[in-house]
Amino acid sequence: MGIQQGFVRGLAPGVLLSCLAMAAEKDGPTVSTVPPMPASSAELNLHQRLTEAWQTGGIDLRHSDAVFAWVFRHLPDEVTVYPTENYYYWRLTTGGREIRGNFRPASGEREKGILSFAYTEWREFPDDLPENPDLTRVRRFSAEDGVTVKCPDPLTCDVSSEGKTVRFHLHDLPQLPPASFPPALEEVFVERTWDESGLPFFLCFHRAAKCFFWVLNEEKPVAEVFTETAPGIFMGRRTGFYFWRDAACGNRKILAAVRGLSVRRNDYFDGPFDQLADNYAAQVPLRKYLAEAFPAIAGEIDLHGYFTSGPDKGNRVALTSHLMYDTAAQAMDFIRRAAESPVPVAAIAAGGKDR
């Protein structure tokens, strides 16, 4: 990927497995912003069940019809889709493999009776293993395939297949401007989004610098624990996201860097570049500011930011307005230099260029 606000579309992001062993921390103060949850809200994952699932088989992973039928059959009758690009992610462990994929009642497609479905084999070590094309599938299901899609209202989607109906509740995220920080000169609010990392963001645009940038939405406590790795630089311990504290604008946190590994393996922590507010595309000024940032594509993109013609048709303009880092030292050095520049958000956005 490695391109600033380039043209990339991920397939089936996953979630990083965490180690239960905790070591003594020596890398600075840790601040938790997660409110206490009832014990019933937590989730316990048992290694025993994972080990047993590795031994199972019987699903032909090469055939998307079979995988769709199995996963759909095991969904609850009602689900909630949190990411604002409307991907409902899942993972399947079987036959010594982990498969990660999604159902997507996409805006503009679900109204036509179409449901997207995709999956791929999870690669824990993407730099060492090539992708397996036999286990990567992308399909669009409709009534012709025995899958019906109905939308009783703009944020509800009922999908039926083989006698079962699943109701997909889409994220209700009113597009109100930020209330937690004052905008700086030349800045405009574009939209609110919710990333598959579980973090909410504001997408903003700097009109003088012609660049997008991402601000963490902290109007409510966020599901992350931050370590201040240097004055004004915070790392999310769960996501690996680095943020710069913008003291001039209400101490808001600007997303400054995401793990390069997460980008390469397309997991939940590859950044919010593509999780845009699709359900509100007709209400927000995304296309207007895409045209300001990239005049050459002004007439080639739709309301959602997808190309409508040419070799990139069907791909989305990816707003990678941050560095993709390989080491903590690299991320921190980048953020320090950006903070000293005349327009720090523009310097941070430039970190998404080829390097």
Image: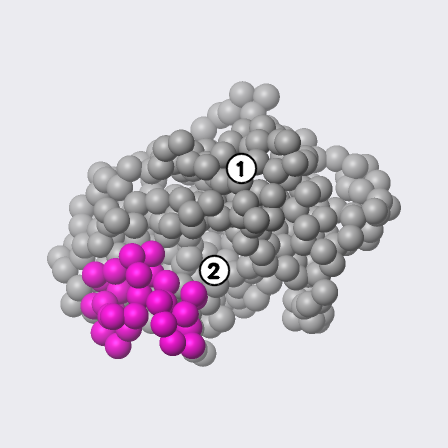
Q: Residues within 10 Å of mark 1 (few under 14, many from 20)?
A: many
The residue labelled by disc 1 is: 159
Query: Type of residue at label 1?
Result: Val
Camera-nearest residue between 350 and 84: 84
* The disc label shown at residue 36, or none: none
| Left or right placement of residue 143 versus residue 107 in this view | right
Magenta stretch in the rendered image: 287-315
Please indicate, yes or no, whether residue 294 appears anywhere in the rendered image.
Answer: no
The number of numbered badges drawn on the structure is 2
Furthest residue in direction front, as rendered:
144
When the figure is inspected, residue 2 is found, relative to residue 145, above or below; the finding is below
Q: Which residue is mark 2?
A: 258
Query: Is 156 included in the stretch rendered in magenta?
Result: no
Can residue 69 be seen? yes
Q: Amino acid at mark 2?
A: Val
Where residue 21 appears, x then y in whole percent?
A: 70, 43
Secondary structure type for disc 1: strand
For residue 89, side relative to residue 177 (left or right)? right
Say which residue appears at 67% left-offset and 54% top-offset: 64
* The magenta stretch spans residue 288: yes
Residue displayed at 83% across by 47% down: 58
Mark sitting earlier along the chain (1/2): 1
Q: Is residue 61 above or below residue 79?
A: below
Position of residue 51 measured from the top left corner of the image (x, y, whole percent): 82, 43
Q: Main secondary structure of the magenta part?
A: loop
